[in-house]
Amino acid sequence: MSATAAAAIVERTFLDELFDRGLLIETGVDGLYGRSGLFEEIGEGFQALVTRHGLADNAEIVRFPPGMSRAVFERSGYMKSFPQLAGTVHCFCGDPASHAGLLQTIKQKGDWTADQKASEIVLTPAACYPLYPAAARRGPLPAEGRLFDLLSYCFRHEPSRDPARQQMFRMREFVRMGTPDQVTSFRAAWLERGQALIGELELPCRLDVANDPFFGRAGKMLAINQRDQRLKFELLIPIESEANPTACLSFNYHQDHFGHTFGLTTASGETAHTACVGFGHERVILALLKHHGTEVKAWPMSVRKALWG
Ligand code: ATP
Ligand code: ZN
């Protein structure tokens, strides 16, 4: 074997293996992939497992599409904290004359996107964003608060060759709204349940305090503050790297941030507190494939049972 051929074998990454096996399908864009039937089957098993672990709470199921209202997005303050991750939907709004110009620009390989106009839709950055104003519209929360079960494709502009960092991926979330006590005890319960759930899948994991990738210099302070107050925890599983394990589950306490922003109140008229637990759908599937191998039929019987009964 030549030295180049040997190097090529050594350099084959986990992403290459996923493409070779047809589990993920290349599109030409880093972080934007198709999924095979088998990949989706693993995902369905995982979602059923999450549902089982949360069943006793009787969460209200709500599904939003992967785009959300631009007005709500602006109000949420997302552009203040994470402008680098946001994706907006722009459309052609011209007349037949400008259409001719558009086609000409494309033909000449010019920047035809410059004349696209922002639509009223942006891509959903996290499954829970469209929920807060919708919940607030229902009026004050009942005394016991509310609990929602969400699942959505999300977009984040973070192109990468790490298969666990995609630009379009799914996020399952449970979102709790209520008093500080209701919300923090929900999060505490899921910190335990999350570890038990990943334990059933026989994956190595570690819980850690975390922060969101706030933008810019002011963002550094926000990140420090978030860590100091232990507002975000992540359940980390090694996927692409042993040294830098990947956040597969996140446990976020927003205090009254969303309650205040969207006018969500408790039964007694206080600003509601909120928390969410997020499950990275693709990340858990990838963790399973990484640790148990891409030959799914050869996975431990106990793991297969946890997923598919
Ligand atoms: P990271 O720190 O790796 O950027 P995060 O902790 O900021 O992720 P959250 O905003 O808490 O992510 O999103 C909730 C869940 O969505 C995460 O726990 C993770 O499993 C998943 N997730 C986040 N970003 C991505 C991505 N780019 N690709 C795939 N899954 C993701
Ligand atoms: Zn959330």
Image (tube, rainbow, N blue to C red):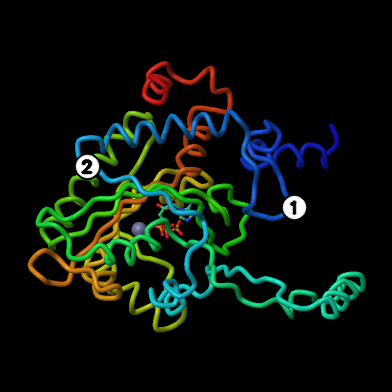
Label annotation for residue 28: 1
Relative placement, left or right, of 106 versus 55 is right
Q: Is residue 248 visible?
A: no
Instruction: Please report the residue visible at 59 percent of the width from the left and 73 percent of the height from the top.
Output: 119
Residues marked 2 and 1 touching at CB (< 8 Å):
no
Q: Quadrant of the N terminus?
A: top right
- Counting from the top left corner in percent of width and height, residue 159 is at 62, 60
Q: Residue furthest left?
A: 268
Few, some or many C-alpha atoms within 10 Å of disc 1 (few <14, some 14-19, many ≥20)?
Answer: few
The amino acid at mark 1 is Gly
Q: Nearer the viewer, residue 253 or 9?
A: 253
Residue drawn at the location 42% of the way across and 76% of the way down: 81
Label placed on residue 192: 2
Q: Is residue 154 left or right of residue 56?
A: right
Marks 2/1: CA distance?
39 Å
Q: Counting other residues with Cα less than 10 Å from the Cα at mark 2, is it few (<14), some (14-19), or many (20 or more)?
A: few
- Looking at the image, residue 194 lies above or below residue 256: above
Tell me where residue 272 sits by quadrant.
bottom left
Could you tell me which secondary element the residue under label 2 belongs to? helix
Res. 21 image quadrant: top right
Residue 288, horizontal then vertical, whole percent: 47, 33
Of the two numbered discs 2 and 1 on the same chain, state the one appearing first in sequence: 1
**Against 170, is 20 above or below?**
above
Q: Nearer the viewer, residue 30 or 13?
A: 30
Amino acid type assigned to the residue bearing label 2 in the image: Glu
Of all residues, the one furthest to the front in this rendering is 96
For mark 1, give the secondary structure.
loop
Q: Residue furthest bottom?
A: 218
Q: Is mark 1 within 8 Å of ligand 1?
A: no
The residue under the point 41% across, 43% down is: 237
Split into quadrants, the picture shows ligand 1 in the one at bottom left
